Amino acid sequence: MDAHLPKETKELAKKHRFKSLKRVDLVPDQLLDPTPFGAQYGSLENGLTYYVRCNPKPQMRAALALAVKVGSIFEEENERGIAHIVEHLAFSATKKYTNHDIVKFLESIGAEFGACGNAYTSFDETVYELFVPIDKPGILSEAISILSEFSSEIRISEEDLDKERGAVLEEYRQGRDASGRLSEETFASIMKGSKYANRLPIGLEKVIRSAPAKIPKQFYEKWYNLQSMAVIAVGDFPNTESVVELIAQKFGHIISPEPPIISPGPKIPFHGETRFSCLVEPEASGTTVEINWKMLNDEPKTVRDYKDWLIGVVFRSALNRRFTKISRRKNPPFFVCSAAEVELVRPVKAIQISSSCKEKSILEALTSVLTELARVRSHDFSEREISIACANIMAEMESAYLEREKMQSSTWRYQYLQHFLRDEAVLGLEFEAQLFKSILPQLSASEVSRYSEKLRMSESSVIIITEPRATVTEKDLKDLLSETNSLEEKGKISPWEDDIIPEEVVQVKPNPGKVSEESEYQDIGVTELVLSNGMKVCYKCTEFKNDQVIFKGYSYGGYSELSESDFLSCILSSSITGEIGQFGYKPTVLEDMLAGKRAGVYTELGAYTRSFIGDCSPSDLETALQLVYQLFVTCVEPDEDDIKRVIHIVEELIRADERDPYSVFTNRVTRIKYGNSYFYKSPLVNDLPKVDPKKACEYFDCSFKDPSTFTVVIIGNLDPAMIQPLILEYLGGIPKPSEPVFHLKLDDLKGLPSTPPVNVVREIVRSPMVEAQCSVHISLNIKLCSETLLEEMWFATFLSQLLQTKMTQALRFKHGEIYSVSVDSNFGYSKPSKTADLEGEITIEFSCDPIVSSALVDIALDETLHLQEHGPSEEDVSTVLEIEQRDHENELQPEEDLSQDFDKSGLLSSCFRVNYTALSSRASSE
Ligand SMILES: [Zn+2]
């Protein structure tokens, strides 16, 4: 069914721009094409559905999936958690593959190990995914063969199950923190009255601990039928036929038992009365209010449905714009608030408005949300608000459309998964872009505003509030509801007043600068300019993406230069100026000015550098460079209200941190690793009065003041004729200050103040918790020699990978005590230098049952010592190199990070120095 694929050549496709794309005549009853766009799609005689598509992005890779329409909702009470356990057992062993075979195979394709890394289980489905290289013969065939084994040959014995219980239990324990408990309670209160409410996929602890093997075995045999499965293969294949043949060969012989008759799906609770749920969680990260309006999750089937869906998108965009503006007012009722459509379970979705606010401000936040909905019902959005929303949505579609030929295989895989699991239409971006172009310009403000009728409190709504301490009762919420209702009925809600928005980002045209020096580096296609104001600019035209230009400007000198007395204020520079506006306008005003454009610039203040980073559409490059110009020539001018609002936000974040039982641990770890230095200390609420917001703003202004200290790199789909004039006008037009500002050379930079431990430190940190959890952090100091730095950086990466493999083998497979472990190398705090040695650390982190933590730390250290004393085996080295090679190839794919230009060479070194700090923690409820 390749007929759906566009037949244009690449050149033609590029010229086929969005603007010339024809609109379609809208026939409301016209059915959307139910066949998935661009796939060879069909089913085998045994009922298995398949989707195969040739897609060259990324090269020589394929994204595969086995989708099974079986999830936790199929479980009986004594089976709660079993669907997920079956997923784990798949990676443990099958009839043909032992655990060792599967792990070896995953390593050979550069994949992370196993269950939940390559699969997920939800209420309604279980999906196994593999992302495989196809440059070596046999890998694709083996990958499909493994998926075939998962469909019908998973081995489930008592021994297999016992080996996996520990990992699943640890996964369960990880979910028992404040946010896990809250999402469980929230979900249960939304779905109350349905079987879904009691079928969270992770299940019950007692089932995980003690269910006999016959239970998952029966579940697997009963529900895993080829009739409810699909294989999806999207990749850089020579043709689709051979892949379909491979699927038929690996799956065709399987005969599924008759599928069990599925009784009508679980009852879905809809209701006329609002439901309330007041949750109190002492470890909560904040105070939140959430309203859900439940509705059936029907996918659009006709053009009319599609239009209704798009109206919802426009409505939420316009509403969110109002919420953002409210959040930036004096004494705002909430910090953030936004509306979204979310899928709760396959048959039910919700329109969800969620906001977070100051402690004890629930009622203000809820009043504001309900009033805004009533305001839209009473007065409609303005035509201008709707045109801003439509322009932004259209700009996103334009960008997607221009990149349609470069869509990643994993994105296609996701779309076909949705087609199979949700009956979601896959229409292709060409047709969807046409629908957008035909529908959006016709939408009127009143048509969009009518959507607010769906968000009446009588429409299956559930209000959920979360607080660290109870301050609000259900009765308070009910009273508030009837108050706002009666205001709306009496017509006492006033219309919305919108801001006045300037037309141009740059009010006075700058005086363009000149080129002082120009060099061409033809071998890498880079042009380098030194401008008359001293700024250095390098650019390169690329065609990796059609609709993207990215740039970064950086200068040496950052927080490490600050004195201790300035540090506290200046470290808050980014947060404070980000809220007030860094480009000469308030953020909400700037957002309106940029409506319909794709141009973003953000700033980063770091320990050793200051930078600005931009990402835009080639057609909006001028706007993006105007933002950089504004960043340098304007000052952040805060008023008292702005400052009060920002300090409130910071205070709330600090309080959340203080409630978090893990902050005791992270603070202690930092203290041990770096000493009692101001730089690494988290600020306390008591520190806030010492913050000088004016100083924070001044520091920010000085950080982006002197163009002569900045080097800028611009790459992307640049117009060679336009790039220099734009650079000269907006970057060259930045005036150079009379005195240099923060003019620092690389070797003049100050190092961060820290005093690392001289001996091995091993410590247990205790923190009271609602439910016992434990996190382990082991840090090993390493030092890389400057002469061989590049090579040793790779050694550090290889070593981390090798340690991770060893730790996984020991802690997960041999002892069955952990879910996962991560090993990383980190040089973040080290001063950049071309001549000095580089100091950093390798960290090992995992979570586990508090009772076994010390024993597991011993095992981890033994593994490390063993490796130090005996070095890696040949097999270890080749496995690590294979994983790293695959990883490296994935990163080298053109559309990925353009700054990756190292070549991999060398073998694993055993030269990391023995000077390690081992830390372990135990945190438990006492
Ligand atoms: Zn899992």
Image (tube, rainbow, N blue to C red):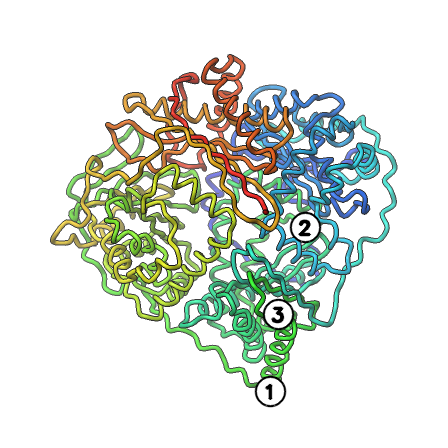
Residue 78: give x, y in percent of width and height: 81, 44
Q: As rendered, which of 225 and 42 lies closer to the eye?
A: 225
- Vertical comparison of 748 with 298: above or below: above
Mark 3 CB within 8 Å of ligand 1: no
Amino acid type of the residue tagged 2 in the rendering: Glu
Distance Cα–Cα, label 1 vs label 2? 42 Å
Q: Residue at x 41, y 25 (%)?
A: 796
The tally of labels here is 3
Figure quadrant of residue 783: top left
Q: Tell which circle, 3 or 2, labels the residue nearer the N-terminal end.
A: 2
Q: Residue 451: which disc?
A: 3
Mark 1 vs 3, N-terminal side: 3
Residue found 60% across the figure and 77% down from its top? 480
Q: Residue furthest bottom?
A: 490
Of the numbered discs 1 and 2, the one sitting upstream in the chain is 2
**Considering the numbered disc 2 on the image, is that residue within a helix, a strand or a loop?**
loop
Front position in the image: 113 or 563: 563
Q: Locate residue 367, reporting x and y percent.
A: 55, 74
Q: What element carries label 3?
A: helix
Reply above or below: 872 against 686.
Answer: above
In the image, what residue occupies the spot 37% across and 35% down?
899
Q: Mark 1 points at which residue?
A: 490
Of residues 757 and 597, the one nearer the viewer is 757
Tag 2 residue: 424
Residue 861 at x, y percent in the picture: 50, 25
Please tell me whether mark 1 or mark 2 is closer to you in this view: 1
- Kindly identify the amino acid type of the residue bearing the numbered disc 1: Lys
What's the CA distance linking mark 1 and mark 3? 21 Å
Q: Is residue 625 left or right of residue 908?
A: left
